[in-house]
Image (cartoon, grey):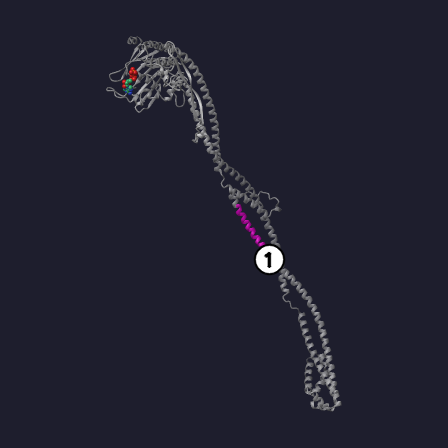
Amino acid sequence: MHLKRLELNGFKSFAHKSEFVFDVPIIAIVGPNGSGKSNVVEAIRFVLGEQSVKSMRGKTGADLIFKGSREIPKMSRASVSIVFDNIDRVFHLHQDNNNRINVDFDEVVITREVYSDGSNKYLINGNEVRMKDVHELIASVNIGASGHHIISQGEADRYLNANVKDRRELIEEALGLKVYQYRIKESERKLQRAEDNMRESELLRRELAPHIRFLKRQVDKIEKAKHLRIELMSQYQVYFAQEDYLRRKLGSDLDIEREQVQKEYAEVQRFIDNYGDSNETDVFPEELEIKKAQNQINEINRKITSERQELGRIEGMISLLEKQQRDAQSNNNTQIETTHPGFSFEVVREFLTDLLTQIDLMGVSTRITFGTIKKSIEDFIKTPVSEIQTESRQIDNTKEISVLENSKVSIQKTISEFQLIIDSTEVSIKHWEESLHEKRAQYQESQKQYYEYVAKKKELDARRQIIMSRDESLGLRSNARNEEYTEAKVLLGVDSIEYQSIAVEHELEITAQTQEQLRREIERIKIRLEDIGGGSGVELIKEYEETMERDQFLEKEITDISTSIESLQSIISELKESLNAQFDIGVQKINNEFDRFFKLMFGGGKAQLNPAEIKKRKKKSNQEDQLNIIDELEEEESTEYGIDINVQLPRKKVSDLDMLSGGERSLTSIALLFALSQVNPPPFLVLDETDAALDEANSQRYGDMVESLSKYSQLVVVTHNRETMSRAQTLFGVTLGRNDASTTLSLRLEDAKKYAK
Ligand code: ATP
């Protein structure tokens, strides 16, 4: 593979299309100062994708476009194309969805255009591509965009000027190990990204954790609520089944009892009704009889008393008469009258008239008994008092006494007859009283029974009342059950609670109390459910599952990232190991060549590249960093190795680069440049006035080295050095025309030699 052509159009001083054909191993670009030679070198840099406008001596992309002259207007676009030979198909371009560029051609043409606005366009074989594609394409043939193969003017000693670290990088690039650096950098970028992702995922997971814990608690609650709902359902089923059973039982018990009470009530009522009919009065005939008889006895007793009084009076009269008689017999009758002034026949007559009235009032038998007495009394009464008195005075009182005696007897008889009546009446009374007592006992007995029935009726009334209230509460119980059933359905979110098929166990033990206990148990479950909170939680469970899924995804991602981090770390360390190993080998080879070229240039001495230790302090990246808590003590110390250049000039004790003369510095640089090119020859090498500082003898040596290098790499040298020019097979003369634009002129070897002389 080699450079075939270079075409410039509007690039810097090359206003018009200029072509450089590179068909020989050594090409020299020559011309006066300011003619545009270095512009050619920069055009090569440009077309190969150089991104630093500064390295092409411009400030903006527009500085790369021909700015115009008195004769030629300024351009709006600069274009450079470079043509490589690809007969050996050395160019490769990774094919992907964004890139379908075919480089399977004998020539590979890379074109870059820049516009006034600074925008760029890249083409490979006429197809527009990304800058990245150009970089990749040239990297496949060991050419870097700003690589070691293009040494711009005054840049030859850049290896010497660079610090140990940059120098190592330059050397790595020259050794073609840049690809390792790219891959390491790429892997480190990936590692960084992976670590960032890891941190991000871990952070997300940490952020998710409390939410998951919260959701988990909620889901646990929902699960608990689910179980509680199942438990509630089964309790409800048992409850309603038992409740139906209990209500039926209570209903039928109540019916039986009601019937019983009704029956008893009817019986009691019947008794009470009948009792009323047969026991309307509590007055007995015996009582009337007794009262009548007692009245009679009282009457008779009164009569007896009266008779006795009469008897007493008669006895008094008798004793008076007897006394009168005795007195008359002994004195006279008038004394009697004076002795007894209260006594007179009128009084006696009055008394006897009363007695007759009494006798008339007496019963028939008494009247008969008193018949004779009555006659005598009537006769006595009818007799005139003068007669009686005369008679008395004339006769004694024997007759009167006798009459009175008779009356006395009669009265006594009457009294005893009265007594008989009383006795017989008392016997009757006794009988009646006995009968009355018996009747009263019977009456009391039936009264007692009656009141017992009344009491029973009251009791039955109370029972009826109780039955009614029980009936009522049974109704209320049914209502309550219906309400409970509705509530249960709402609570459980079902259309119905199937409990009809539930077998009621231990029927005898089911009571209102056991139901109440069950209801309380149900209430307890309901309260627990209420505490947990309502809702089916479908949304929450979904959210929990999604969050868990996300967490698991993150967990897996963290595992994957961790695996990829491990693998990247091992790739990086492998790459570093390979890089170091190859670098060491490369440096060894370079050292051989460097020393050889150095000796060649200086006619002796020693030159060597040596590793130089670089201590690096790096803040440890830990989780706290994310929280902006940076612990100053958390630092990592790592050791890297850069490259030192040690030279030993012949016959001089100088080993410090800074102490070299300009020429010595240039020679050392060239020795190193050539050593590098020798170890890893690039397809072409562009050297812009690298030989500027060389004296004639050194120019000779330089020319020799250029020739020897051209065996491995095509050489494009910009030079004012005639010795160097003489080694070229083609010379391109660049001049600045009258129109202030660069023009080219190609000279073949022979002509060149002529030109050189
Ligand atoms: P030397 O031998 O002194 O190194 P040289 O041949 O390498 O000179 P260059 O440095 O390549 O010369 O060219 C510089 C010339 O290019 C300057 O005259 C400069 O004015 C001209 N130039 C640079 N950029 C532009 C541009 N954008 N438009 C026109 N001319 C430009």
On the image, which quarter does residue 72 sit in?
A: top left
Tell me if I can see residue 18 in this picture.
no
In reply to whether residue 483 is colored magenta, the answer given is: yes
Q: Quadrant of ligand 1?
A: top left
Magenta stretch, overall SS: helix
Percent coordinates x, y for residue 527 in the rendering = 53, 44
Residue situated in front as seen by the camera: 198 or 225 = 198
- Identify residue type, mark 1: Asp
Percent coordinates x, y for residue 405 in the rendering = 74, 83
State whether residue 2 is above or below residue 375.
above
Magenta residues? 466-485
Residue situated in front as seen by the camera: 315 or 193 = 193
Q: Is residue 124 left or right of residue 444?
A: left
Which quadrant holds the N terminus? top left
Residue situated in front as seen by the camera: 578 or 266 = 578
How many neighbours does mark 1 have within 10 angstroms: few (below 14), some (14-19), or many (20 or more)? some
Q: Is residue 533 left or right of residue 430?
A: left
State whether residue 89 is above or below residue 264.
above
Tell me if I can see residue 56 in this picture.
yes
- Which residue occupies 31% across, 16% down? 38
Q: What SS does tag 1 mark?
A: helix
Percent coordinates x, y for residue 102 in the rendering = 38, 19
In reply to whether residue 43 is colored magenta, the answer given is: no
Residue situated in front as seen by the camera: 380 or 319 = 319
Q: Is residue 441 left or right of residue 183?
A: right
On the image, which quarter does residue 440 sit in?
A: bottom right
For label 1, the residue is 461
